[in-house]
């Protein structure tokens, strides 16, 4: 915000130099970024933080200086002389949405003559970076720059009545679906029902708080002016301005909150100036519609807590003095202050806000430097979810994966690029109402598109091997509820190019990612994990599996199918996994306990089995473990053979079995009996033992 130094001095009689003033403003939190000479006067370029909308004007900055220097603030006093018919019967004002417009004030000025503003007004506007237009519009801009309250002037003769025979109407309402308006910049805008407009009896005549319409603008022939001064909800103005791509001096201030208590004062000040510059007469009375008055909050400030946070030793009287300088009403009650916050300070909502004001007025440079003393305290323990997430991260890093962080947002085509059809349940995401860009307009329902995009970026940059994981959230829509169901999830992505990347590298294939998932879950103490064949739009047929705990799904893994690889320009050896970490958090896991190693010898046997192709290896393994019981210490598949020597529709699986008893040596008869029981059970599922 550009602000002339000599304008500041009109409101507060400071004797500081421009450099000293700039330094003081910066210490108060209003950083002076630069200074230049415009029309022979120093002009500050001040960076105002978003929550300090009250400082986006000359009087607001002057108020800060006056409070800091303990000087009086010279506020202008408008001299209003009303005459002629009253304003209220001449114009009707209706607010249809008080949540978005809690207050709307207006004055009617008749008999004005539109022309050039005085030279000093045009000069002041140019110093502040605003283009002069005419004496009516220039007054609205001048008052906005001085008081922080945006104003708008309508040609009252162009406003249409709400009914036959009625007076010109102002209706503050939401826009109609696909309603159109041509704004003052000459652009045609198509509106939606979330946008607030100022309308007359027939059409929208302004975008509330953003920009006026060309159908009611003040022109050279304007004789009667309706002057608007209103308070609008900041979020509404921000949404409208961003959706339409408009930034104006008015919207910039309304987005950061304008004082709802200053509408009438700004009207009076502007009306007084219009009479000086354009003549005419001010109609009797102010039209002030306020269906939802803004309450001034009452806060408490505890002196001991403030001193503890600031490292100071200030008294209640000192703190009360600091806050009173900022026009806050303060009452000392014991060791606390009861503070009523004026409407202009919308940034003060909690005790810590008041403590910050005390620090600013006391001066950050006056707070002594002290060693930080931290005592031991017992806080709340980390939640089970956070502990498990930290453990999961350590395990995945130990598995040789690199952690990646991607956006929780995705574009409208990302799921389709990952192979999902438009009617798939996961393709019905929660859509962001006003996204900055279309590519990040939807809350993701799967990690697969994010992981594929991650692999694609790294592959295009020449990496021949990628091993990555992400721990993040998914947002699954719930048709019956407004908010989605959030699920903490783990994604794993692995890619291998055609060229070797070094000695001793583990091969990346389907079994590598399957083994990594199994190892990950084992180290998280998840029991009963199994994999079942799966058909999935992202994965190749026969190269995908569903991860189960018992019969409940936990996740998916597989090799990406060729059609999806083509969308991302990825090599064929690309593998993904997605696991529901939220489900793991709620599983019952027993604390690992030490078991003494048996001192008795083990017995090893090998079994070569003739297995039908439609019989899962997991079923064979479950059968062997069931009959092996506690004596079966280990079971491992070590060979898979398929050849013409085998019966059609079968393949050979060879297992290594290790038996051991904890308290004795096993006999040959015991082992043979177990093997016999295994063979009988295998026959029941169609599996035969191969004999040499």
Image (cartoon, rainbow, N blue to C red):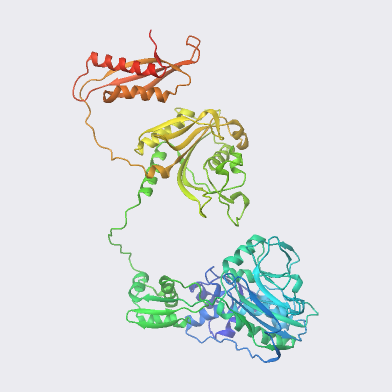
Left or right: where does residue 407 sit relative to residue 187?
A: left
Look at the image and tell me in which quarter the N terminus lies. Answer: bottom right
Look at the image and tell me in which quarter the C terminus lies. Answer: top left
Asked whether residue 505 appears in the rendered view, the answer is no
Left or right: where does residue 417 sit relative to residue 203?
A: left
Percent across and percent down for residue 372 are: 33, 64
Percent across and percent down for residue 598 are: 22, 26
Query: Would you place residue 578 above or below residue 687 in this image?
Result: below
Pick the residue in front: 75 or 365. Answer: 75
Pick the residue in front: 8 or 690. Answer: 690
Query: Would you place residue 445 above or below residue 255 in this image?
Result: above
Which residue occupies the extreme front position in the image? 164
Asked whether residue 447 appears in the rendered view, the answer is yes
Which residue occupies the extreme right position in the image? 221
- Residue occupying image coordinates x 60% and y 31%: 562
Quarter assignment of residue 37 = bottom right
Pick the residue in front: 404 or 259. Answer: 259
Query: Would you place residue 280 above or below residue 468 in this image?
Result: below
Which residue occupies the extreme left position in the image? 663
Quarter assignment of residue 298 = bottom left
Query: Would you place residue 72 above or below residue 219 in this image?
Result: below
Left or right: where does residue 413 sit relative to residue 555?
A: right
Pick the residue in front: 507 or 70. Answer: 507
- Residue occupying image coordinates x 49% and y 79%: 342
Quarter assignment of residue 399 = top left
Q: How many marks?
A: 0
Left or right: where does residue 105 sit relative to residue 507?
A: right
Percent across and percent down for residue 687 are: 41, 16
Percent across and percent down for residue 504 are: 44, 27
């Amino acid at each position: 915000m550009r602000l002339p130094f000599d304008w500041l001095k009109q409101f507060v009689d400071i004797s500081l130099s421009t450099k000293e003033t700039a330094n003081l403003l910066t210490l108060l939190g209003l950083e002076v970024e630069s200074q230049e000479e415009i029309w022979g006067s120093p002009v500050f370029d001040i960076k105002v933080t978003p929550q300090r909308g009250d400082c986006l004007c000359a009087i607001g900055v002057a108020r800060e200086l006056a409070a800091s220097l303990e000087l009086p603030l010279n506020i202008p006093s408008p001299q209003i002389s009303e005459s002629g018919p009253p304003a209220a019967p001449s114009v009707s004002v209706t607010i249809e949405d008080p949540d978005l417009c809690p207050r709307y004030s207006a004055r009617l000025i008749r008999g004005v003559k539109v022309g050039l503003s005085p030279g000093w007004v045009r000069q002041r506007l140019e110093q502040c970076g605003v283009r002069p237009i005419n004496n009516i519009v220039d007054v609205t801009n001048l008052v906005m720059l001085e008081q922080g309250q945006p104003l708008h002037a309508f040609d009252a003769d162009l406003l249409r009545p709400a009914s036959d025979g009625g007076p010109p109407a102002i209706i503050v309402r939401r826009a109609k679906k696909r309603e159109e308006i041509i704004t003052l910049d000459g652009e045609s805008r198509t509106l939606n029902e979330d946008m607030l407009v100022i309308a007359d009896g027939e059409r929208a005549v302004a975008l509330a708080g953003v920009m006026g319409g060309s159908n009611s603008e003040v022109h050279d022939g304007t004789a009667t002016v309706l002057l608007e001064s209103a308070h609008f909800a900041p979020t509404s103005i921000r949404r409208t301005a961003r959706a339409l791509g408009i930034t104006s001096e008015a919207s910039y201030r309304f987005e950061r909150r304008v004082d709802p208590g200053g509408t009438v004062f700004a009207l009076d000040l502007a009306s007084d100036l219009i009479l000086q510059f354009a003549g005419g007469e001010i109609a009797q009375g102010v039209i002030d519609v306020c269906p939802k008055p803004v309450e001034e909050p009452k806060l408490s400030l505890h002196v001991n807590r403030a001193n503890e946070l600031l490292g100071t030793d200030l008294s209640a009287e000192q703190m009360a003095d600091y806050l009173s300088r900022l026009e806050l009403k303060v009452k000392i009650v014991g060791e606390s202050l009861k503070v009523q916050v004026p409407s202009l300070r919308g940034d003060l909502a909690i005790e810590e806000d008041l403590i910050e004001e005390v620090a600013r007025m006391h001066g950050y440079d006056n707070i002594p430097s002290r060693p930080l003393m931290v005592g031991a305290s017992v806080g709340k323990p980390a939640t089970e979810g956070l502990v498990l997430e930290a453990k999961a991260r350590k395990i995945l890093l130990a598995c040789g994966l690199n952690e990646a962080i991607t956006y929780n947002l995705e574009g409208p085509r990302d799921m389709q690029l990952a192979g999902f059809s438009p009617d798939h349940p996961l393709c019905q995401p929660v859509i962001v109402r006003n996204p900055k860009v279309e590519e990040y307009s939807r809350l993701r329902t799967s990690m697969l598109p994010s992981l594929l995009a991650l692999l694609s970026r790294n592959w295009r940059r020449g990496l021949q091997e990628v091993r990555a994981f992400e721990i993040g959230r998914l947002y699954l829509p719930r048709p019956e509820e407004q908010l989605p169901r959030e699920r903490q999830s783990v994604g794993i992505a692995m890619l291998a190019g055609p060229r070797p990347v070094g000695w001793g590298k583990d091969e990346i294939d389907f079994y590598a990612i399957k083994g990594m998932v199994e190892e990950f879950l084992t180290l998280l103490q998840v029991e009963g994990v199994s994999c079942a064949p799966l058909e999935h739009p992202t994965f190749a047929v026969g190269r995908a599996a569903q991860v189960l705990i018992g019969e409940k799904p936990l996740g998916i893994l597989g090799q990406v199918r060729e059609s999806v690889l083509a969308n991302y320009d990825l090599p064929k050896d690309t593998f993904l996994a997605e696991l529901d970490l939220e489900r793991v958090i709620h599983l019952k896991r027993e604390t690992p306990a030490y078991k003494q190693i048996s001192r008795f010898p083990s017995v090893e046997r090998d079994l070569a089995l003739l297995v039908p192709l439609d019989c899962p290896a997991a079923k064979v393994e479950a059968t062997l473990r069931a009959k092996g019981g506690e004596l079966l210490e280990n079971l491992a598949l070590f060979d898979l053979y398929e050849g013409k020597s085998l019966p059609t529709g079968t393949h050979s699986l060879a297992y290594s079995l290790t038996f051991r008893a904890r308290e004795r040596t096993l006999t040959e008869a015991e082992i043979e009996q177990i093997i016999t029981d295994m063979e009988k059970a295998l026959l029941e599922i169609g599996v035969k033992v191969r004999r040499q």
